[in-house]
Image (cartoon, helix red, strand yellow):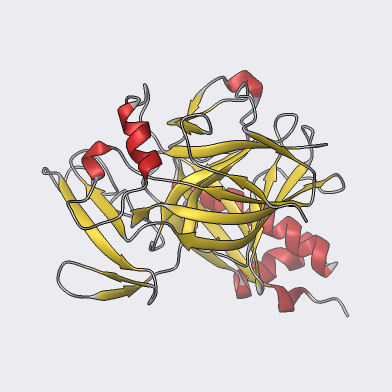
């Protein structure tokens, strides 16, 4: 299989926005694998001497800050045959670190407690790529579990240019810590070619991402992108080797819960071949609702259900 590699550069990155009119940085066939390199952070997030800073991050800084705040994304990758109404299956085959540091930021008017912290607090966090460990300022060693905070297709063309900050039907800034290597994300296609982009690398994150950032860092991802013509989705879904995941995204957490739950009822009913009433009951007995994030203006809730509970044999 030909190795498709999309490097980070001024030509392959879009900073702060999704836009259905963006020309593809690469085009692949359905079922092909692609390696995508990413970087994260503005000039104010750089570390001091002694750390590796990817040159392409410095090149992006030198080209000027974005007109709208948001994430540095690499892409988009067009997938041949993808059309609106299809589903893009994103198999996350591998995620690896590209640098030996990450940063965390919190400040006024941001995060889950926007009024509680009036001063900017910026922390550079050393990352041990061999041991898979982050060392926090007071000496705690935190195990890394890298994933991409942002994975998305192009939004509906009628939306125009939108910020990368809010997650919506196209995916985007989902910030779901379950989406590590070995998991699969499903996104409803909104534009011909799907136009997949990713970025916002996280070394580690808790459910909620409450202070507004995780361990923000540069990552490399290896993905298999496949077009599904026989599956219909209202909103993004995912699966791990052991669990199904449905998602809800809205400014109101109650609405997020309703969205994730309704989609899980439908999924459980279809896969277990049981009534919606029985599926609702099983969600109450064995499904878990979790807070994805509470900081992206559009908040997130995801529901997980063990696959082995839905076996029909």
- Taking 132 as reference, is 72 above or below it? above
Instruction: List x then y, in percent, for residue 145.
Output: 44, 68
**How many labels sit on residues?**
0
Observer-nearest of 57 and 179: 57
Image quarter where the N terminus lies is: bottom right
Instruction: List x then y, in percent, for residue 89.
Output: 72, 51
Horizontal arrangement in the rendering, residue 292 relative to residue 49 (left or right): right
Observer-nearest of 161 and 224: 224
Residue drawn at the location 60% of the way across and 24% of the way down = 22
Image quarter where the C terminus lies is: bottom right
Residue drawn at the location 51% of the way across and 41% of the way down = 167
Q: Residue furthest left?
A: 119
Residue drawn at the location 22% of the way across and 38% of the way down = 109
- Taking 151 as reference, is 190 above or below it? above
Location of residue 252 by image quarter:
top left
**Residue 166 showing in the rendered view:** no
**Residue 229 showing in the rendered view:** yes
Instruction: List x then y, in percent, for residue 63.
Output: 35, 25
Observer-nearest of 21 and 55: 55
- Taking 254 as reference, is 204 above or below it? below
Horizontal arrangement in the rendering, residue 123 relative to residue 73 (left or right): left
Residue drawn at the location 17% of the way across and 51% of the way down = 48
Observer-nearest of 277 and 125: 125
Location of residue 152 by image quarter:
top right
Instruction: List x then y, in percent, for residue 169.
Output: 61, 39
Horizontal arrangement in the rendering, residue 122 relative to residue 288 (left or right): left
């Amino acid at each position: 299989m030909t190795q498709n590699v999309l490097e980070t550069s001024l030509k392959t990155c879009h900073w702060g926005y999704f836009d259905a009119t963006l020309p593809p940085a690469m085009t692949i066939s359905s079922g092909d694998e692609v390696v995508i390199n990413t970087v994260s952070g503005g000039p104010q997030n750089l570390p001091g001497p002694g750390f590796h800073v990817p040159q392409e991050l410095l090149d992006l800084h030198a080209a000027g800050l974005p007109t709208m705040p948001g994430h540095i994304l690499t892409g988009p990758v067009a997938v041949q045959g993808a059309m609106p109404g299809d589903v893009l299956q994103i198999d996350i085959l591998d995620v690896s670190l590209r640098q030996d540091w990450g940063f965390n930021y919190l400040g006024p008017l941001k995060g889950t407690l926007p009024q509680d912290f009036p001063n900017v607090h910026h922390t550079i966090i050393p990352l041990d790529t061999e041991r898979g460990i982050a060392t926090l300022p007071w000496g705690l060693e935190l195990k890394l579990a890298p994933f991409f905070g942002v994975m998305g297709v192009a939004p509906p063309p009628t939306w125009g240019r939108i910020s990368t900050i809010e997650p919506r039907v196209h995916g985007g800034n989902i910030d779901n810590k379950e989406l590590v290597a070995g998991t699969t994300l499903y996104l409803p296609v909104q534009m011909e070619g799907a136009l997949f982009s990713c970025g916002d690398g996280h070394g580690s994150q808790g459910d909620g991402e409450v202070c507004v950032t995780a361990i923000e860092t540069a990552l490399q991802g290896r993905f298999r992108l496949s077009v599904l013509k026989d599956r219909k989705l209202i909103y993004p879904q995912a699966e791990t080797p052991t669990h199904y995941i449905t998602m809800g995204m809205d400014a109101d957490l109650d609405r997020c819960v309703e969205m994730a739950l309704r989609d899980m009822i439908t999924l459980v009913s279809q896969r277990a071949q049981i009534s919606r009433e029985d599926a609702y009951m099983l969600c109450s007995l064995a499904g878990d609702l979790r807070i994805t994030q509470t900081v992206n203006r559009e908040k997130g809730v995801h529901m997980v259900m063990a696959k082995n509970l839905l076996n029909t044999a």
